[in-house]
Image (tube, coloured by chain):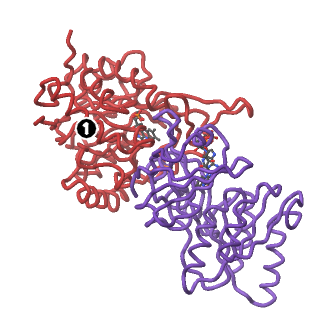
Chain colours: A red, B purple
Amino acid sequence: MVNTKVNLGGLEMATPVATASGTFGYGTEYIGAVDYAKLGAVTAKGIRLEPWPGNAMPRHCEVPGGLVNAIGLQGTGVEQFLSITVPWYREESAATAGRSVPLIANIWGGSVDEYAEVARRLGDAVDAIELNVSCPNVKSGGHTFGQDPAVLAQVVRATRDATRLPLIVKLAPNVPSIAPYVAACEDAGADALSLINTIPAMVIDIERRVPVLANRSGGLSGQGIHPVAVKLVHDAHRATRLPILAMGGVFDARDAIEFLLAGATAVAVGTATFSDPGVVAAVHDGIVDYCIRHGFSSVTELTGNLAE
Amino acid sequence: MTDEKCKVVSHDDIGAGYRYLVLEAPRMAAELEPGQFVHVRVPALEPSALRRPFSVFDADDGCVTVLYKTVGRGTAALNAVRPGDTISVLGPLGHGFPMKCEVEALLVGGGYGVAPLHFLARRFVAAAGLPRPRLFIGGRTAADLLAVDRFRQLGVEVTVATNDGSAGVKGLVTDPLDDLLADFRRHGTRFELFACGPDPMLHAVALRATGTGSKGWISMDRHMICGVGACYACIQRTVRGNSRCCIEGPVFAAEDLVW
Ligand SMILES: Cc1cc2nc3c(=O)[nH]c(=O)nc-3n(C[C@H](O)[C@H](O)[C@H](O)COP(=O)(O)OP(=O)(O)OC[C@H]3O[C@@H](n4cnc5c(N)ncnc54)[C@H](O)[C@@H]3O)c2cc1C
Ligand SMILES: Cc1cc2nc3c(=O)[nH]c(=O)nc-3n(C[C@H](O)[C@H](O)[C@H](O)COP(=O)(O)O)c2cc1C
Ligand code: FES
């Protein structure tokens, strides 16, 4: 028997496999197609204080090795999330999994205060909070919160003061070096890190000579970003003792095990579920098989376990 | 909803770029309602490729039939599928047409848009207490008119319009439709419209339903990622705001659509 339990900064997960925010709705949409018993946590789609309409269409484009999206964070506001989404998720996911599957709320905002307010209102209705800091800070001319370690620290600290839940900060990949961002999160009281968010990307329709996405550009996810993510997880792990939830192009167990060996405590499946909702279960089972083959009795032994 | 591994029963080229794909899908066939769709993983594409959404032309005896047009890389790759192959199909998905109608049922379609209308017609014809529908089908030329025989076999009266006059009335499908609607108005005959086809056709049909006291049910195509309501890629503007075509649709009430 392989022990699949992991602890992500206070979030107890029965398996090291989660879903990535924005690719799994509010956690109930894939019931019937995804084996919830194999999930350690579900990350819901991003929410802020008020409902948000998102971008114009088209919002996505398939590219070799991935997907470029500019959904624009369309989603529900925190009040509706608490009154409708969370109770519905709790009931439905427990019924399909045969146990409760922890729910991570992914939050974003236009200001530091908004993050803190959303976290405060969430209370203890969810099991952890993930901060999406890859959205524009309205008050500072639209730079994203995650681009400046000082601003990042402000958001993390303000949210830390507003919640006692495990606090996961989701880092953007498009920085020259990840270490200062990792340090900023750790100093400001984060319990865990998640990486990577999508990579800024653009596709042009050469016949019409216009960008394909209505938003002009978007974020690249999927298979093609996996090696980029492995490097960032590896670098982040070297820079901190915070546990890491790794994501970016996990399509099979090999991808997931790479992340664990690079330093992750758990992994999240995102884009892969769109083409194959069976990936979650295959990743889980493949990690267990790997542990058996290599004589590990616990998945936690894989974290950062590179032979060097 | 399940991700069903389906055996291909047949895959016939019917010309002009159209094919019927018949799949053995007992679970889905039993559950599908007209207007719902399935999300198909195309085996010859790379494993990470997105699925392709298709309406259901027929669901019967444990089989699901799709009528599709080859338009791009995914549908071209789907052409390679052979009887006996297994393909992964997610469904049933979305909200279809209402299965109740106490007035005349007029179906309006063009191109592969006749697919969900065929399934609807079959269910209407088979059910007691539902009207025998009439079909108005339009296309650029006679080659774009699909499955006309299949509708006639069901006992559905078919009215044809082509832009070039190569079959039926020369003009738009709304020309013969408007003649009938004028007749209905004179006699006080009540009706509902059920439509699927190119956007301009759908818009024209929706206009004939909204504000007239008649209901219209419009099946929309939007580019999709997940097909299950999880990603918010497939937005259709409605009176409620940005609605997801894959789960709040693909069939919308005409009065709810914002064009
Ligand atoms: C609810 C619904 C029902 C449909 N029913 C049918 C049907 O019964 N028969 C049929 O032939 N076609 C149907 N379509 C359209 C069909 O999904 C597209 O023709 C197909 O996805 C094209 O894929 P491609 O790779 O060949 O084209 P490409 O243009 O190469 O595709 C690129 C991307 O755009 C998407 N895309 C392109 N055209 C469309 C479109 N019209 N609608 C949605 N996505 C599109 C593709 O899925 C793919 O992700 C339906 C679409 C929807 C949303
Ligand atoms: C359609 C789509 C929507 C996403 N929405 C969000 C979001 O709301 N919040 C967020 O933090 N990340 C969002 N992401 C990023 C993913 O959670 C994940 O970090 C990224 O896609 C990399 O993982 P993947 O390659 O497995 O998809 C989204 C990604 C996709 C493809
Ligand atoms: S395609 Fe994902 S929400 Fe409709």
The x, y position of residue B105, in whole percent, is: 66, 78
What quarter of the picture does the N terminus of chain A occupy? top left
Q: Which residue is mark 1?
A: A284
**Other residues around mark 1 within 10 Å, as few (<14) / some (14–19) / many (≥20):** many
* Chain letter for the residue marked with disc 1 in the picture: A
Q: Is residue B127 above or below residue B71?
A: below
Q: Is residue B100 above or below residue A173?
A: below
The x, y position of residue B250, in whole percent, is: 56, 60
Q: For ligand 2, which image quadrant applies? A: top left
What residue is rendered at 34% in x and 51% in y? Answer: A27
Residue type, label 1: His
For ligand 2, tell me if the residue under mark 1 lies within 8 Å: no
What residue is rendered at 34% in x and 29% in y? Answer: A195
Q: Secondary structure at mark 1?
A: helix
The x, y position of residue A286, in whole percent, is: 26, 33
Taking depth in this image into account, of B9 and A15 the one nearest to the observer is: B9
Query: Residue A163's image quarter?
Result: top left
What residue is rendered at 55% in x and 56% in y? Answer: B245
What residue is rendered at 36% in x and 51% in y? Answer: A33
The x, y position of residue A148, in whole percent, is: 40, 24
Taking depth in this image into account, of B122 and B188 the one nearest to the observer is: B122
The residue most toward the bottom is: B187
Q: Is residue A51 above or below residue B147?
A: above
